[in-house]
Structures are given as C-alpha cells and as structure tokens.
Amino acid sequence: MKIKQRYLAFALLWSVFPMAVIAEIDTRSESEIRILCEQLFADYAIYIDHLNADGFANTFTPDGVFWHGDEAVHGREKLQRYIEEHGNQAHMIMFTTIDIDIQSESQASGVGYAVILNGNRQVQQDDAPIQMQGITAASQYMANFQLTDEGWKISSMAIEGKFRGPGYL
C-alpha cells in the first residue's frame, strides 16, 4: 500500500512540476522578458523600416521563420535576402499595441498590432517627406520568442492584414 501511495504522490508531483517551474519565474524576470520581447517588435520595425537586412535577420533565431501571407522565409540568410530584394519603397511600421505571454523562462509568444505606412519610392538622404494617400494597412503580428545563447530572439513571426487603406500599393 505504501508503494502505491508513494507512486501516486510521485506521479502527482511530476504532473504539477511544469506549472511549478512557471510559477518560479519571479515578477522581475517576467518584466524583463516582456520588455525584451517588446523590444524585439520595435527592433523588427526599425530594421525593416531602414532596410537594415542584417539587423532584421538577427532579430530572429538562426532557424527563425517569417510568414508574410502564404510566403514563409526560413533562416537568417534567407531573411536577410528577403529584405534586400523587397526593400524598394519608404516604409514605416508603428506598433500600437503589444501583448506578451510568457510560457517559461525561455519561451514566450506575443501579438502586436501596427499601422503601416508606405511611400511610392525610397527615401533619399536629405529628402523632404514623401507624399502619401493615407494609411497603407493595419496588421496583426503574431510572434514566438525563444531565449538563445545570443539572448531573446524571434523564432517565428506571422503577419495578418486586418485593414487596407487608400495608400495601399
């Protein structure tokens, strides 16, 4: 009888253990993870807006995946090439809302909503503001984050358009 009780107690403890690990993340660590993941959304936007292909690719894990519509781009080299090949217009992403959900000390997910502006050409040095016809789009960004040896990175990100404005090109 004692063996069965010990086995049952061990099985119960083992089934609760993952929740105990998550409960061990203190408030300070949760805040740090949220800030770092939110910063990845900001870095993503800045790098893509400035056509910084290397910076953009390095916000992702080495095997990270970027989904834009039905197109999936896998790995940093292809992510870098994606920006180099698609960067032909002035572009600005303005995140309005970001929510981060922490799964563990090394995994998180998040959703961000952004207004996206596009011009009809690339910005030149000392250029005047580019004329626009209005907001291009409002999109939802769904991301998974992973703690790596390099720090927190995006392991996958998918964009889903929610609204398209008159400035859509």
Image: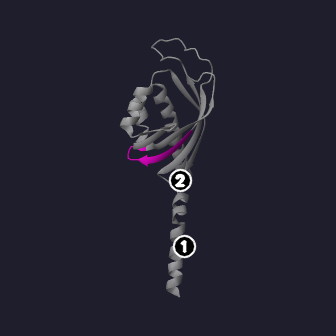
Who is closer to the viewer here, 168 or 128?
168
Amino acid type of the residue tagged 2 in the rendering: Gln
In the picture of the structure, the residue carrying the numbered disc 1 is 12
Residue sticking out furthest to the bottom: 1
Q: Is residue 52 above or below residue 36?
A: above
In the picture of the structure, the residue carrying the numbered disc 2 is 103
Image label count: 2
Residue sticking out furthest to the left: 77
Task: Give SS at disc 2.
Answer: loop
Residue located 41% across and 47% down the image: 148
Specify the segment rendered in magenta. Answer: 141-151
Asked if the magenta segment contains residue 49, the reply would be no
Counting residues from the start of the chain, the first of labels 1 and 2 encountered is 1
Amino acid type of the residue tagged 1 in the rendering: Leu
Q: Determine whether, in the image, residue 70 is placed left or right of residue 75.
A: right
- Would you say the magenta stretch is mainly helix, strand or loop? strand
Q: Is residue 25 visible?
A: yes
Q: Is residue 40 above or below residue 90?
A: below
Residue located 41% across and 35% down the image: 79
